[in-house]
Amino acid sequence: MVNTAANAAERTIEGPSLTLTRRLRARPEKVFAAWTQAEQLVQWFGPPNMKPATLSAELDVRAGGRYRISFTRDDGEYFEAGGIYREVVPNERLVFTWAWHSTPERESLVTITLKPDSAGTLMIFHHAQFFDETARDNHQRGWSSFFDKLESFVA
């Protein structure tokens, strides 16, 4: 009986997830820096409909460190996301929690794995524990557009 309840709780916690894979024309070191150095992150992160010069990033990249990223869309709506780094393996792996300031109770988990590839880096991006399928689908669209910008930035 206890196991059944625990298994049901685990399934509820897991929620929908998504995995996006990109081959980037840059070494893992360069891709890792694009994710972990605020001055680089602000050059590629954010949606296409973002007001220029509104993107801000504060990153304390170490296990237990916090980050905060914010921007304003063209329509004036303000967005802020943040979380805690759970695991940091330079040039290989980055794991952090993710939550929008408007819905802090909807915390999800991002795992980025970087693997050397003949042409540069294979980036495997896994975002798990979404609240529901709609949240997953919205994030999939957002991350895909962000990664188009990342691809150009590191190339």
Image: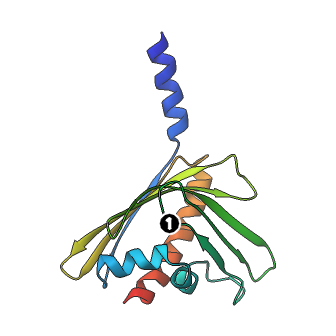
* Count of numbered labels shown in the rendering: 1
Quarter occupied by the C terminus = bottom left
* Residue 89 placement, left or right of 12: left
* Residue 77 placement, left or right of 45: right
Residue at left 45%, top 88%?
Answer: 153
Residue 130: image location, x then y, percent: 56, 49
Check disc 1 and report its element: helix, strand or loop: loop
Relative to 145, say whether 65 is above or below: above
In the rendered image, the residue lying farthest to the right is 76
Residue 131: image location, x then y, percent: 61, 46
User: What amino acid is at disc 1?
Assistant: Val
Which quadrant of the structure image shows residue 124?
bottom left
Q: Which of these two is toward me, 123 or 40?
A: 40
Residue at left 58%, top 82%?
Answer: 42
In the rendered image, the residue lying farthest to the left is 118
Which quadrant of the structure image shows residue 25?
bottom left
Residue at left 46%, top 81%?
Answer: 150
Badge 1 density bin: few <14, some 14–19, many ≥20, Cα 10 Å: many
| Residue under pointer 1 | 61
Q: How is the image coloured?
A: rainbow
Residue 40: image location, x then y, percent: 51, 84
Residue at left 56%, top 50%?
Answer: 108
